Amino acid sequence: MHPSNPSPHHLHKRDFAADARLLKISCIAAFIGCCGTLAAFLLLKLIRLFTNLFYYQSFSFGASSPADHHLGLWAVLLPVLGGLIVGLIARFGSEKIRGHGIPEAIEAILFGKSKMSAKVAILKPLSSGIVIGSGGPFGAEGPIIMTGGAIGSLIAQLFHLTAAERKTLLVAGATAGMTAVFGTPVAAVLLAVELLLFELRPRSLLPVIIACAVAGFTRPLLLESGPLFPLHTAQAGVAALLSCVVAGILGGALSALMSTALYRVEDLFGKLPLHWAWWPAIGGIAVGIGGYIEPRALGVGYDVIGDLLNNYLALQVVLGLLLVKAVIWVIALGSGTSGGVLAPLLIIGAGLGVLLAPWLPGADAQLLPLICMAAVLAGVLGAPLTSAVFAFGLTRDADALLPLLLTTGISYGFTVLTMKRSIMTEKIARRGYHIYREYGVDPMERQHVDEVMTKDVETIPAGLSVAAALDGYFGTRQIHRCYPVVDADGRLTGMIERSSFPALSSAVRPVATLFEPGPESLVQLVQLVALPHETCRIAAARMATHHLERLPVVRDLQSMQLIGIISRSDLIKPSRAFFEDEQKRERLIRR
């Protein structure tokens, strides 16, 4: 049939799978967006409270920096004390609070049916507030992703939802919290797509968008509005192309080095003859010493990021800050304490940019810290779009978008080619789970039942006698293992195969025909069928669940008119086309 005159049979097919439940999930996600903002507000207040308690011995929620303390050498012990407290919380509360949060969220999504406990929702922000408040060189984003995800999961568990729907609400909570902390809703949505959802469908994308948008709108009610680090760089010219490429390669190399160092340190902690609950306190020793050498390396360090982006610090200061921050962050996170990775990576990446700025052409002194910051983030996360848009959201510098896109892409390519796994997946791999982060449209989702089914079906009349059926269809001339049975109007009655005949015992009255309603019928009544507009994936799942090798295909469930049959061999057809697209090489233009 000509493409301009399609068959009416194809008019029912949609671009996306959607149903009324999408509205319900989206409404719940909107509420979770509000909860994410509240959780971010409480987490940031906890960090401020513990910073004031540890370094200034005052019960205050006011903003303060650990770098301004006057405790002298006593300050070295504060990260040790914080690590000790958090180790005990993890030991006797929940081990799930260890780490920076994103791998734990991924593990819950992929291998835990998106179920998280109320303990995590309470203890994760508490432990992170203690660690960061006592000088831990971490950000709030990892804890809020874990906390927001736990809140989304708990709310989802109040309803009758599938694991896929719980996953959507878990991710909605995680990204809503990130939106509230940084004011970057678009980057949060991209983080979900590149790192957490493992799919790109309306059923997950729309609720996440709604949650992030709600968190973005409600953020000014509790937190400061506007970009965290407003910046305006000069428009980059062609000469900046080389700088972006160099910055991307070096950013990717630095992220690979940091990732490798982190897990080497974690391996060293694993060899200690001590319970893991003591490790954060040992890591706190390194943090305390590093903080004594360079106080501005302690804590979240948002003020440091702003100074680096605006090029307010001398090169010698930046070099010392970069080294100390990298070392104490690797040791502290490797010890299994609680804290995030984004803010430290922003400092380390921006510091790299400041060091490169005098040597690279075509980019001003503010652009290099910005693109290097995003490059390191892209290499560590394995999420180039998230990193580029995140850097834009933090600064609102539209002129930097093109350099950001190129630099994060180069860094991402470098780590993909040189590293097997990222910080986000290495920990999960060490627990025996493999995560494959490439995904595309499943070929079995792209094709429907009516495109691969066998349309010329040999059927058996329901009124045929047992003897005639045995002789005509199951004797020496048998072609198929199983046949559909239809009545005089072409309605599907059931399925019958050779094994159906000896099912009758001698005590049961023989039936004159194949189909007689009641216990003596030889026909297996149809309970499972396929519909022509269903995808091959749905049909395959139905067969696998019920251990079937084939399904009859009916026009609709009301008429039960048989129009075909789909078997396991038919389901191979989409994969065969996919294999040819992926593996068959050919030259179409001859020289």
Image: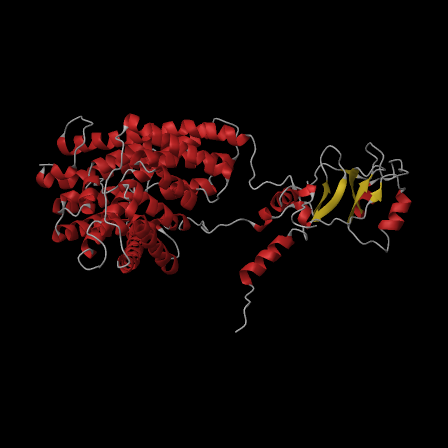
In the displayed structure, 296 sits above or below 127; it is below
Q: Quadrant of residue 33?
A: top left
Residue 573 seen anywhere in this rendered image of the structure: yes
Q: Nearer the viewer, residue 337 or 47?
A: 47
Please say which color scheme the image uses: secondary structure
Residue 278 seen anywhere in this rendered image of the structure: no
Q: Nearer the viewer, residue 313 or 478?
A: 313
Q: Nearer the viewer, residue 259 or 334?
A: 259
Q: How many marks?
A: 0
In-image side of 470 versus 75 (left or right): right
Q: Position of residue 2 (x, y in %)?
A: 68, 50
Direction bottom: furthest residue: 591
In-image side of 466 versus 270 (left or right): right
Residue at position x 54%, y 30% in the image: 21
Residue at position x 34%, y 57% in the image: 410
Q: Position of residue 216 (x, y in %)?
A: 34, 32
Q: Position of residue 68 (x, y in %)?
A: 12, 37
In-image side of 138 versus 499 (left or right): left
In the displayed structure, 352 sits above or below 393; it is below
Q: Nearer the viewer, residue 34 or 227?
A: 227
Q: Position of residue 118 (x, y in %)?
A: 39, 29
